[in-house]
Amino acid sequence: MHNVLEAEVKREGPYLMRTNVSAVSNCNREGFKGQMRLSLKKRGATFVAGVAVASMVLAACGSGSSSSSSSGTTAAQTKIAGGTAYFAEGPGAPPNYIFPMTPGQFFSINNLAQFQILMYRPLYFFGIGQQAVINNSLSLANPPVYSNNNQTVTVTLKPYVWSNGEPVSARDVVFWMNLLKANTSGWAAYVPGSFPDNVTSYQATSANTVVFNLNKSYNPTWFTYNELSQITPLPIAWDKTAATDPTPSPTAANLPDTTTAGAQAVYKFLDSASRDLSTYATNPIWQVVDGPWKLSSFTTQGKAVFVPNTKYSGPVKPSLAQFVELPFTTDTAEFNVLSAGNGAITYGYIPVPDLAQKGRITSQGYAFNPWYDFGINYFVENYHNPVLGPVYSQLYFRQAFQELVDQPQWVTSFYKGLASPTYGPVPTHPANPFADATSKTNPYPYSVSSAVALLKTHGWTVTPGGVDTCTSPGSGANQCGAGVAAGTKLSMNLQYMSGQTAIAQSMQALKSAASEAGIQIALSSAPFNQVISNAVPCKPTDASCKWNMENWGGGWEYSPDNYPTGGELYATGAGSNYGSYSDPQTDTLINATHTSANPQAALNAYQDYLVKQLPNVWQPYPPYELSMISNKLGGVTQNAYLDLTPETWYLKG
């Protein structure tokens, strides 16, 4: 029974949006690693013996993830066919969602870029090393062709096949689109009026060609980088509503017309199966892959063992016999295994507090390679919190609060000089053509006195060391602002990701500075996966809407929204707009980046406004991780979008 497929579907509609993370045990220490897509920042001497050693250590201590640049080699070393490489995931956020159409609470680097992508390739692949550009070589399709004043897009697929022998076809793209249009509420990358709403029709015109008709003319770079990039072709074998359904035939002459109810039933089945971690390696659904790897075993703690997909059609076939992702609950656990020097981790990371021991680790046969990604770092306020939401909606309050964030000091003291400040929505590192001068300049430098002055001049009685109170309610220029009730107190909760020292230190420093301005912050910590599950868009009347501020530690890494226009993050109603920020001018500027005949001018206007607007709280952006790569591992590259490509790796001996 085919529940979702059809030859052509039409949909009228308006307009889009979207986020970067990683960890097994109970030992304590931290480093970077841990962001949301949502980004999370993270991450020994015979590799076979390392399995037994790792198992013993993991049972006692724990384990966590990323990729990097090529490690060192010597003339005596040669490439070895086969073998196993062990990759350390980051603390507290192991992979926990396998279905590529991912909801917000699972929309993380560790799920998308370092788990799903190994098995299920997106239509277009991005990143050539540290270059934030499209990678046509690794894409499933040829570059899209735009016509009809950029309102028609033609995509031609390359000759890839699924592991079950079926071709990766245009119908697989239509399958994704049919599922998506009926289930946008469950997709973290959705922005109302944008993709797929801006696609009025799509059709498989041949076995390998799909034509998209758009509701207006769009900037081709934006549509390719941020819209077509969202598509992951799905195998027809997944077109089911129950495990007992017969596997549909992709060669059927006429597929039944799909219905919204049918597509929703298929999505419900796949989403439910994706939440059953214990069956990832055994469920036949997930064994149909088009990527270079298949899942051989998986534990609910997040240990993933991959083997090569022998049917992989891409340009680089795996050399390794196995690729293993090791979970860790803390950076201490990972560092204990790494520093043991027994090769139990092939690709790991050094936590920031342990940088002084870098020399000892490199002397044990590892190369130090910090992994920089194309992203920004921030934490969110809940604009819909029933008590403090109206406060967060006041620009003067956001300005005052940002002035309590001492980014230069945090970079020096807590990130050991390895992070860079974040001042706006467009990344400034790695070097790229998108960020302008305004995004590189801090308009709100650290100043407790300035923060206090802003609060006093807007109707607050400031009590340093105590709690400020709104004593002049109203929407006047010298009052607390619309919706802020008399007697409202600046007492709030802030939850941050556990397992990383630098984040904990930063939040303690913020709490201390805020106290000087009379803002009382109650801090708590939780694993990454819990923090991002709490930071969800909500209505003020929802029981789940009582949260104030959530800091998952890594902000946002720009993919699959690879062109940094911010629609998924800041557009009204966007799926990854976790704080429910809404501003008509921001929406207008975002839309202009999608359609303007002068894309760079539109992008500059957008980023310059958001730098001043402060839709969230900016904080330093460290490298994704401080990678430590065994000198016995070759072929490693660090992708600017944090995509993991172990098919290029090989062991040396």
Image (cartoon, rainbow, N blue to C red):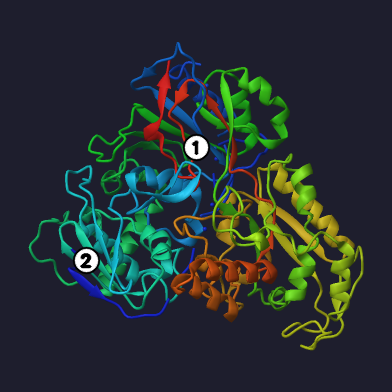
Please tell me whether residue 343 is drawn above or below residue 22 in the rendered image.
Answer: above
Residue that mark 2 sits on? 3
Please tell me whether residue 354 is drawn above or below residue 428 in the rendered image.
Answer: above
- Residue 491 in picture, x, y percent from top left: 79, 68
- Residue 109 in picture, x, y percent from top left: 50, 49
468 to the left or right of 27: right
> Is residue 19 in view from this perspective?
yes
The residue sitting at the top extreme is 76
Q: Residue at x 24, y 67 (%)?
A: 211
- Tell me, for residue 635, which label it has, or none: none
Q: Residues within 10 Å of mark 2 (few under 14, many from 20)?
A: many
Secondary structure, mark 1, is loop
Secondary structure, mark 2, is loop
- Residue 289 in picture, x, y percent from top left: 28, 45
What is the three-letter code of the residue carrying label 1? Answer: Ser
- Residue 632 in picture, x, y percent from top left: 48, 20
Q: Residue at x 37, y 57 (%)?
A: 272
Please tell me whether residue 568 is drawn above or below residue 125 in the rendered image.
Answer: below
What is the three-letter code of the residue carrying label 2? Answer: Asn
**Quarter of the view holding residue 316:** top left
Residue that mark 1 sits on? 67
378 to the left or right of 603: right
Name the quarter where the N terminus is drawn.
bottom left
> Which residue is nearer to you in this view: 46 or 451?
451
